[in-house]
Protein backbone atom coordinates (compact mmCIF):
# COMPACT_ATOMS: atom_id res chain seq x y z
CA UNK A 1 0.00 0.00 0.00
CA UNK A 2 1.24 3.44 -0.93
CA UNK A 3 2.16 6.10 1.60
CA UNK A 4 -0.50 8.14 -0.21
CA UNK A 5 -3.17 5.93 1.38
CA UNK A 6 -4.38 6.16 4.97
CA UNK A 7 -6.71 3.54 6.43
CA UNK A 8 -9.09 4.49 9.23
CA UNK A 9 -10.91 1.64 10.99
CA UNK A 10 -13.73 2.81 13.23
CA UNK A 11 -15.11 0.16 15.57
CA UNK A 12 -18.51 -0.52 17.08
CA UNK A 13 -21.08 2.19 16.55
CA UNK A 14 -20.76 5.23 14.32
CA UNK A 15 -23.56 7.32 15.75
CA UNK A 16 -24.31 10.51 17.65
CA UNK A 17 -21.97 9.49 20.50
CA UNK A 18 -18.94 8.77 18.28
CA UNK A 19 -19.43 10.99 15.21
CA UNK A 20 -17.65 14.05 16.64
CA UNK A 21 -14.52 12.05 17.49
CA UNK A 22 -14.54 10.50 14.02
CA UNK A 23 -14.83 13.97 12.41
CA UNK A 24 -11.90 15.19 14.53
CA UNK A 25 -9.78 12.21 13.50
CA UNK A 26 -10.42 12.87 9.80
CA UNK A 27 -9.83 16.62 10.21
CA UNK A 28 -6.47 15.87 11.83
CA UNK A 29 -5.55 13.61 8.91
CA UNK A 30 -6.57 16.25 6.36
CA UNK A 31 -4.62 18.95 8.22
CA UNK A 32 -1.45 16.88 8.55
CA UNK A 33 1.71 18.13 6.79
CA UNK A 34 1.60 15.30 4.25
CA UNK A 35 -2.07 14.29 3.90
CA UNK A 36 -2.91 11.11 2.00
CA UNK A 37 -4.29 11.11 -1.52
CA UNK A 38 -6.75 8.39 -0.47
CA UNK A 39 -8.54 8.01 2.82
CA UNK A 40 -9.82 4.44 3.10
CA UNK A 41 -12.57 3.89 5.66
CA UNK A 42 -12.55 0.23 6.58
CA UNK A 43 -15.96 -0.29 8.19
CA UNK A 44 -15.80 -4.04 8.74
CA UNK A 45 -15.79 -3.50 12.55
CA UNK A 46 -18.69 -0.99 12.50
CA UNK A 47 -21.80 -2.86 13.58
CA UNK A 48 -24.23 0.09 13.59
CA UNK A 49 -24.50 3.47 11.88
CA UNK A 50 -27.22 6.09 12.16
CA UNK A 51 -27.80 9.44 10.46
CA UNK A 52 -25.14 11.11 12.63
CA UNK A 53 -22.61 8.55 11.48
CA UNK A 54 -23.67 9.06 7.89
CA UNK A 55 -23.29 12.81 8.35
CA UNK A 56 -19.79 12.23 9.74
CA UNK A 57 -18.90 10.27 6.59
CA UNK A 58 -20.17 13.08 4.36
CA UNK A 59 -18.17 15.58 6.43
CA UNK A 60 -15.08 13.38 6.10
CA UNK A 61 -15.53 13.19 2.34
CA UNK A 62 -15.73 16.99 2.12
CA UNK A 63 -12.61 17.40 4.28
CA UNK A 64 -10.60 15.02 2.11
CA UNK A 65 -11.86 16.50 -1.15
CA UNK A 66 -10.91 19.99 0.09
CA UNK A 67 -7.27 18.87 0.04
CA UNK A 68 -7.70 17.31 -3.43
CA UNK A 69 -7.87 13.81 -1.98
CA UNK A 70 -10.44 11.08 -2.31
CA UNK A 71 -12.20 8.81 0.16
CA UNK A 72 -13.43 5.27 -0.32
CA UNK A 73 -15.42 2.97 1.91
CA UNK A 74 -14.62 -0.69 2.34
CA UNK A 75 -16.11 -3.56 4.28
CA UNK A 76 -19.56 -2.14 5.04
CA UNK A 77 -21.86 -4.68 6.66
CA UNK A 78 -25.42 -5.29 5.48
CA UNK A 79 -26.96 -2.65 7.78
CA UNK A 80 -24.54 0.05 6.68
CA UNK A 81 -24.84 -0.96 3.02
CA UNK A 82 -28.64 -0.76 3.29
CA UNK A 83 -28.37 2.71 4.87
CA UNK A 84 -26.19 3.84 1.94
CA UNK A 85 -28.68 2.46 -0.57
CA UNK A 86 -31.76 3.93 1.16
CA UNK A 87 -30.16 7.37 1.30
CA UNK A 88 -28.62 7.13 -2.21
CA UNK A 89 -25.16 7.53 -0.70
CA UNK A 90 -23.95 4.83 -3.09
CA UNK A 91 -24.00 7.63 -5.68
CA UNK A 92 -21.66 9.73 -3.53
CA UNK A 93 -19.31 7.19 -1.95
CA UNK A 94 -17.13 4.70 -3.76
CA UNK A 95 -17.79 1.45 -1.90
CA UNK A 96 -15.65 -1.68 -2.15
CA UNK A 97 -16.29 -5.03 -0.46
CA UNK A 98 -12.74 -5.13 0.97
CA UNK A 99 -9.62 -2.99 1.27
CA UNK A 100 -7.83 -5.50 -0.93
CA UNK A 101 -10.34 -4.94 -3.75
CA UNK A 102 -9.79 -1.19 -3.50
CA UNK A 103 -6.00 -1.69 -3.54
CA UNK A 104 -6.35 -3.71 -6.73
CA UNK A 105 -7.74 -0.59 -8.47
CA UNK A 106 -4.70 1.55 -7.67
Image (spheres, rainbow, N blue to C red):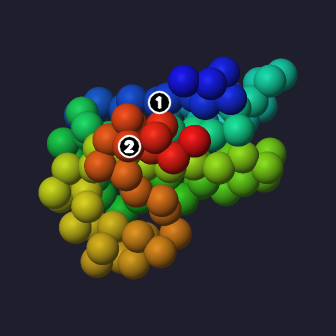
| Residue 103: x %, y % from top left | 48, 37
Q: Earlier in the sequence, mark 2 or mark 1?
A: 1
Question: Can you identify the residue that label 1 sits on?
Answer: 8
Residue drawn at point x = 61 percent, y = 30 percent: 5
| Residue 63: x %, y % from top left | 69, 48
Image quarter of residue 11? top left
Q: Which mark is residue 65?
A: none
Relative placement, left or right, of 13 versus 51 is left
Which is nearer the eye, 40 or 105? 105
How far apart marks 2 and 1 lie (CA) works out to 16 Å
| Residue 19: x %, y % from top left | 44, 43
Question: Can you identify the residue that label 2 sits on?
Answer: 101
| Secondary structure of residue under mark 2 | helix
Rendered view: 5 above or below 70: above
Q: Is residue 59 visible?
A: yes
Relative placement, left or right, of 58 versus 16 is right
Residue drawn at point x = 40 percent, y = 56 percent: 95
Amino acid sequence: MSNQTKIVQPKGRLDVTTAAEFRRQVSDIAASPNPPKYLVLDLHDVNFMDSSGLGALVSALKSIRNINGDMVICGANDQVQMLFELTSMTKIFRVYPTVEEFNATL
